Structure formats: C-alpha cells, structure tokens
Image (cartoon, rainbow, N blue to C red):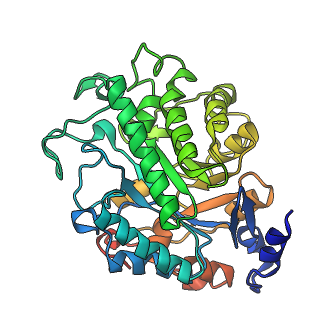
Amino acid sequence: MTFRTQFIINNLPDYTMPLSNAPLFKPFLSNNLILPNRVVMAPMTRSFSPGGVPGDDVAAYYRRRAENGVGLIITEGTVINHPAATNDPRVPRFHGADALAGWAKVVAEVHAAGGKIMPQLWHIGTVRKAGDLPNPEAQPIGPSGLFKPGVKVSEPMTEAEISAVIAAYAQAAADAKRLGFDGIELHGAHGYLIDQFFWEGTNQRSDKYGGDIVRRTRFAVEVIEACRRAVGAEFPIVLRFSQWKQQDYAARLATTPEQLSQFLAPLTAAGVDIFHCSTRRFWEPEFEGSTLNLAGWAKRLSGKPTISVGSVSLDNDMFSAFRGEGSGIASIDQLIEMMARDEFDLVAVGRALLVDPAWAAKVRDGRMDQLMPYRGDALKVLA
C-alpha cells in the first residue's frame, strides 16, 4: 500500500454507524479508485437533457447524491458519437462541445461535494427503430441485424462499421478522462449493442466476431482494448453485463460457472477493472448448488472486484417501475450479510436512490425509519 493510499484512508470521514451496516461503509480501493464506502449509484436513464445536453439541473441531481454519502456515481447512459446510438433526443450525449461542457459542470459539482463519478458509455444497437429521433435517417445497427431471435431489423454490421463504433467508444473514454471523470463504465448489458454481440440470440455471425461464447466477446474485447489505449493503464474501466435481456428476461449468456468463466476471461485480459453484474434481484442465486449471485460468481471466477445490483432496499423489482408502480422498503440485512462474507465488493442502488437522495446517509446513520418508499411517478422528476 502506497503512502498516498494510506493517507487517504486515514483521512476518510469517521462516521458513527450501526455495526450491522459496517460492511457497506468500508473504504474500497482498486486500481487507483479509492472510495469512502461501497455504495454506488446505479445508472438510470432520466431523459432530462434536451438536445442531449446535461444542464444545471442534471449537475445538481448528481451533486445531491454525492453530498449525501454515495461512494461512486455511475451516470445514466450517455451515448457515444454514432448516429444510431440512441432513440431519445433527451438522453445525454457524450460527444459534441455543448454536451461535454455540460458534463464538465457535472463533474465539477460532484467533486466539489466530495464524490466520485463515472459516465456510462452506451450504444443501443438494434433496440433503435428506423425513423427514431434524434437522427431519423439513421438505420439501427447490430452484429446480425437482429433485435431478438427471428426479428431482423437491419443488415449485419460490416467490419468498417464495427471499427467506427469502437473508435467512438475510445474517443468517449478519452474525453471522460480529459474532463476529470474518475473512470468509465461500458454498458454491455440488457440487450443493447455490446450485449447483442454477447448474446447468441442476436449474434449469428460466422466471422471473428461470432461463434462460441468466447468468440462472441471479441467486439467487447476490442472496445475495452481501444478504451484502455485511450486512457492509459491506471484509469478504471467498469463493464456492466447481464444474463437477462429486455428482449427476453429468461435469456442467459452462461448456464454454468464454467461457461461464465470462459466469458469473463477475455474481458478481464482486455483490461476490465470491475464487473458490474446486473440482476433483477440481488438475493437470487445464479447457479444451482450455490448461494452466490451473479456478482459473487463473477468475482470468484475473474478475480476482479464486482458490483452487485438489483432491487436493493425495495420489495419489488425494477420492472414494476416501468409499469409506474411504487414499492415498499425492504430490509438490507441479507445484503449486508453477503457483503460481510466478501461475496462482492460494491452494491449499486437504483430506484431507492432515485427517490431518496439521502439514502446512503440515512442507512449509514441507522435512520432506516426515514427512508422514502419508491413512487411510481419518481421517473418524471429530477429529485
């Protein structure tokens, strides 16, 4: 441990907290990422950036979470510089002088409040439909042109198109470092572009980007390698992945630990520092015969730190939010027990933090009775 690292740890805020919550509020260190606790704000699409430009209200929204003790903020998905990267003109861009200036203000506000922040870099692939704004002329793109098995919406990406998208990811990564972000997250989950290469149901290619579970990681590997070249060896890169897809909630990339190990190995070698393992419910075991969830298995198999996520502190899952439903407050005792066993390193909190900016501070201080329940209309405001 370097003198600098030890100095930072020794000078972290000394909060008095219930002993039962201690595992959630221990400092975290990994590849130059030093966090005061294990609470991560999960990326959540907000669509509050007209023209793709995050404004002062977006900066204030993220600052409120930093002020209230969130260890790391991962922004809503921000789209890379490709005409088919989004289908929503109010989703923030991560390219263009105006949008990047807006993100510079976000970083400044979060850092002024003592927080850490990473942008989530995103391309939605064939989730986009032809004619969608903000670029109605742009055709959706994907490894095989499939939105889901049997549903073709475009032609397969050419290698030239693949190279252009990889370059756009790398440019976004370089811009993130230049603006002072504390790392980047690549969105490789939920049936979007990177995940469409991972998933056999949407990747039917016979070239070097398709085939078995290892070969289907090649696009992501090249994205990670390009980003790593753009930011250097010490800048943290997080990869979010999931088994489920919005096209098929029961879909699975890996049905056994052996397959998951094969999937993670090339991504680890390419330069991923942390795996963000997206599940609908964090407490559900991933494979039969073990209580480990997806983040637990990813940590065991890759040797890398992992982030667990999925309905933390809520009594129903995220799809209820899409239907406009609220939820009650659930105990986090099981989460704390899993963290105490070192099954994973960090926990991402989504809807609970969306409705209650002070969630982390309240949990830290044992004020569980003051937590705010999730409301179905919370997606409509920047609280």
- Please state the horizontal and vertical placement of residue 110, each as a whole percent of the image: 51, 77
- Quadrant of the rendering where the C terminus is positioned: bottom left
- Quadrant of the rendering where the N terminus is positioned: bottom right
Question: Residue 354's image quarter?
Answer: bottom left
Q: Is residue 324 visible?
A: no
Is residue 200 left or right of 265 when viewed as pictured? left
- Please state the horizontal and vertical placement of residue 368, each as a whole percent of the image: 61, 81
- Please state the horizontal and vertical placement of residue 63, each as a whole percent of the image: 48, 79
Question: Residue 359's image quarter?
Answer: bottom right
| x 32%, y 23%: residue | 158
Q: Is residue 149 above or below residue 235?
A: above
Looking at the rendered structure, the number of numbered marks drawn on it comes to 0
Task: Please tell me which residue lies in front, 278 or 73.
Answer: 73
Is residue 131 left or right of 296 when viewed as pictured? left
| x 20%, y 36%: residue | 139
Q: Is residue 128 above or below residue 111?
A: above
Task: Please tell me which residue lies in front, 223 or 353.
Answer: 223
| x 58%, y 64%: residue | 182
Q: Is residue 51 above or below residue 224?
A: below
Question: Residue 8's image quarter?
Answer: bottom right
- Please state the horizontal and vertical placement of residue 49, each as a whole percent of the image: 28, 68
Q: Is residue 37 above or below residue 140?
A: below
Q: Is residue 334 visible?
A: yes
Task: Please tell me which residue lies in front, 49 or 127.
Answer: 49
| x 37%, y 57%: residue | 94
Is residue 213 left or right of 50 when viewed as pictured? right
